[in-house]
Amino acid sequence: MCTAISLQSLQGENFFGRTMDFSHPIEPGLWVIPRNYQWNSLATLKQYNNHFSFMAIGQETDGMLGFFDGVNERGFAAATLYFEGFADYELPLNNKEPIAALDFLHYLLGRCSSVDDVKPLLKNIQIVGVADPVTKKAAPLHWIATDKSGKCVVIEQTKTGLNVIDNPIGVMANSPNFEWHMTNLRNYMDLSTTQKKDVTWGNVSLSPFGQGAGTAQLPGSYTSPDRFVRTAFLKTHVKLPDNPIENIMTCFYLLNSVFIPKGIVITDRGTDDYTKYVAFMNTNTCEYYFKTYENDQILTASLWNYNIHGTHPVYLGDIRYSTF
């Protein structure tokens, strides 16, 4: 359970962020991956060479380093979200290069300078499943990516193949697939930020209960379809501020509407599915802003404050406890 958005400010800066909602224990750490870093694929052990440095939140477990979200030196940003019941890793390869789902975000951040690079890059690859050390299975995933221009795409591999889909709303949640979510928005066309007027039913006059009646049909559950609709409506109707500090505050206000406290969503394993952290990236400045369940203070880190020309990843610490 996660929600992601891109939001362009009045100054033209594109902010990209997500909630990390998960029912398994994770240790989200902040990493800097240097330019030209060489790493081995989990799917084939083939060695890849990054073209760009990036900053990302991820986790290293049992020697496997995987990333949840990140932004690179060119302002290309991406995140991975769960896609239960729809992700398909069993397609025939047909001479395509296999990339492990756990590696895919690293692959994108290290090679894409913009959203325009995504489709050509993925033309001859296919995503395959590799069990991760946290869930002990090949996690079903899909991805959202954006860049400094504000362009946004969703990447989903289903039974129809690996698809890169333009995302004009700049929102993504979990299952079903992205096109279903976009069609579902048509069920909420009557939502409005303005007041509902009095109506008459026969001889009975009905008036709204104070302000906000235009949002009465806004869905409020933590299901993926409801989170998608709620976030899409808020994002497309929020008043954008005219200064950088208020821009980032507005980003966090938007995702507060889908922040899941402990105890509200319980899995069939008896564990809490809750929001581990909320993070935003300024794609123009390569800055990260994040807060965690344990610490509601917004912390920040910049890619440019670290060495992007090294030979090894730099671990900056667990975002739950570090001050950066």
Image (spheres, rainbow, N blue to C red):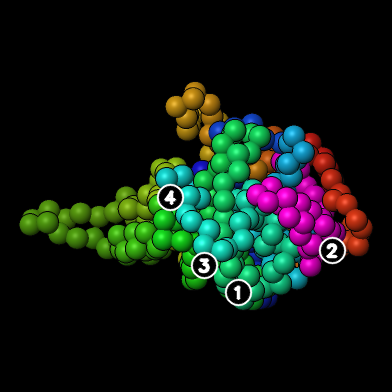
Whole-angstrom CA distance, mark 1 to mark 4, is 23 Å
Which residue is the site of mark 1? 120
Task: Kindly identify the amino acid type of the residue bearing the numbered disc 1.
Answer: Pro
> Which picture quadrant has residue 60?
top right
Residue 171 visible to an observer of this rendering: no
Which residue is the site of mark 3? 164
Whole-angstrom CA distance, mark 2 to mark 3, is 26 Å
Q: Earlier in the sequence, mark 3 or mark 1?
A: 1
Whole-angstrom CA distance, mark 1 to mark 2, is 20 Å
Mark 4 crowd level (few <14, some 14–19, many ≥20, 10 Å Cα): some
Q: Earlier in the sequence, mark 2 or mark 3?
A: 2
Whole-angstrom CA distance, mark 4 to mark 3, is 15 Å
Which residue is the site of mark 4? 86
In the image, what residue occupies the spot 70% across and 56% down?
A: 106
The tag on residue 36 is 2
User: Where's residue 249, x and y in %?
Assistant: 66, 56
The tag on residue 280 is none
Secondary structure under the numbered disc 1 in the rendered image: helix
Secondary structure under the numbered disc 3 in the rendered image: strand
Task: Kindly identify the amino acid type of the residue bearing the numbered disc 3.
Answer: Val
Task: Kindly identify the amino acid type of the residue bearing the numbered disc 4.
Answer: Phe
Magenta stretch in the rendered image: 28-53
Whole-angstrom CA distance, mark 3 to mark 1, is 10 Å
Q: Are marks 2 and 3 in contact (CB under 8 Å)?
A: no
Looking at the image, residue 200 sits to the left or right of residue 112; the answer is left
> Which picture quadrant has residue 281?
bottom right
